[in-house]
Image (cartoon, rainbow, N blue to C red):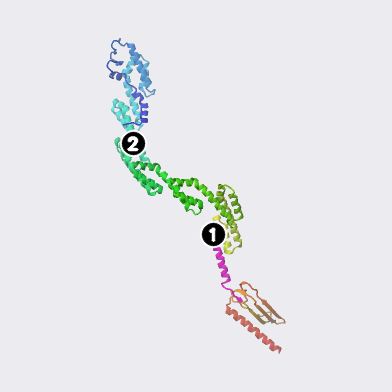
Amino acid sequence: MKLPRVSAVVAAAVLAPAVLFPSTASASDTPKPTGVSGPDTGSDSAPDTAPGTAPTTTDDQARRDRAEVERILAQSPDESWCWVHQGAAKALKGGPAELRHFLDVELPRLRADDNRVLTARLFNSGPAVHAAAAAALDAGDDAIAEFLKTGQYVARAEDDARAEVERILADPQSGVGVREAAEKALKGGAAEVRHFLDVELAEQRAVDNQVKASQIYAVGGPAVQKAAKAALRAGDEAVAEFLRTGQYVARAEDEDRAKVEALVADPATGRGVREGAEKALKGGAAEVRHFLDVELPRLRAEDNRVEVLRVIADKETSPRVYDAAQKAMDGTAEDVQHFLSVTLPALRAGDNRLKVSQLAESGGPAVRKAALEALEGDDAAITAFLTEGLAKARAEDEAAAKAATGTGAGTTTGTGTGTGTTAGGSGQQSQNVQQAGLTGTTSGSTGTTSGTRTGGGTTTGAHTSATGTGVLAATGTEGLGWEAGGAAAALAAGAALVVAARRRSTES
């Protein structure tokens, strides 16, 4: 099994002393090519000699032993836990006997101790490494050496594989099929985990990708649906590419088209922009994008100037709006846009408020009331009053006026003369009687009243009523019906005739 390069390097760095401490004894046991003799460092063996050469002297062996110990010292880490390093340093301080004893006796024992330390220090690695290290420590020195040589790397590979499966399981982008297969693999051993990564993952991911692409197709716009359909027909690689990049390209196209369609649907869109948008929608993604990036700003600027010209030509435009519009036309496209979006609404709001203030002073009762209520609100309340409230309030005022003046007009003309005698400071006089509540026009009504008071004196008076529209003044018969008023007038006239007859009888 091929190990991750990083894991191998780290392990090699930690375990370098263990794998770089070949014993002299083991080196001497290695077969040599025929006719070549290496130094024999065995403790009880005679020095080897090449054919035709003199035997090796004790001094030569001592120099070779010292060189070997120095090499071991240089390759072992200078750490407190490294017994090999400490033993080699101690041996170098002695003579040939101490060097030979270190190589033949102490080195294997010290190396076994160091291997145990190194194995124990791997307990904090992944679960597989921990289990393999514990098993090696229980098995003895040979198992420990084998663990450090190969077993730890196999265990690290298993831990790495499990970590990869756990990462896939934790990824929110993982589909249902991948997630279920990963959970199943983690419940098994190293073989199941490896099989999932090497075989099942690709299969389940392809199925999940097809499901995702189908779901995107179901809710996507025209461009997304087209791209998803093509990918599903092309195969697993095409579906994966669609999910990685294709869907986003298609979504951008759909969003661009939606923006252009919104411009066409907006009633406030100018003629130039509308025509350009409709033309772009007949093309592809490039035409739509070109319209939004290049044509739209130019067409919108042209439409804005046309709109300002309409404001200038409108007879209802106030002087200050007119002046601001003229100034905007002399400026840049940004000035025109600012006038339409900021200046014009503000000026019109001020004009509307002034108009409502005037109506609050000059309108009928209902208009004045509604206008005052609108003035207490914001610009939206002012606009609502002018567009809806004003007509309603005027209708109320007109209805009230009709109720007050009646539905018809009439003319009443009458002349009456009456004579009465008042005794003791009291008397009666004839009256013209109107129907209570009668409205209309009254003209030429003249009444003459004459009377004789006890104690001397005659009073004669004439009364002419005014001509106008409204409710006629009460004449002493308020609350009476027309018939009652007529009866009262007849009684008054009869009384005057009786008094006149008596006066003529007396005089004769």
Report x, y in % for residue 314: 58, 56
Kindly identify the residue that appears in the image at 58 percent across and 78 percent down.
482
The residue closer to the viewer here, 69 or 227, is: 227
Q: Nearer the viewer, residue 465 or 320?
A: 320
Q: Position of residue 183 (x, y in %)?
A: 32, 40
Task: Report if residue 430 is visible in the image.
Answer: no
What residue sits right under mark 2 in the picture? 162
Dot placed on the residue nearer the N-terminal end, 1 or 2: 2
Q: Is residue 232 magenta?
A: no
- Give the amino acid type for the residue marked by disc 2 in the picture: Arg
User: How far is the residue under mark 1 from the one under mark 2?
Assistant: 72 Å
Residue 155 visible in this rendered orientation of the protein? yes
Amino acid type indicated by mark 1: Thr
Residue linked to disc 1: 387
Task: State the extent of the magenta-drawn residues as a range.
Answer: 384-411
Residue 390 horizontal side relative to residue 90, left or right: right
Dominant SS in magenta: helix
- Dot 2: element: helix
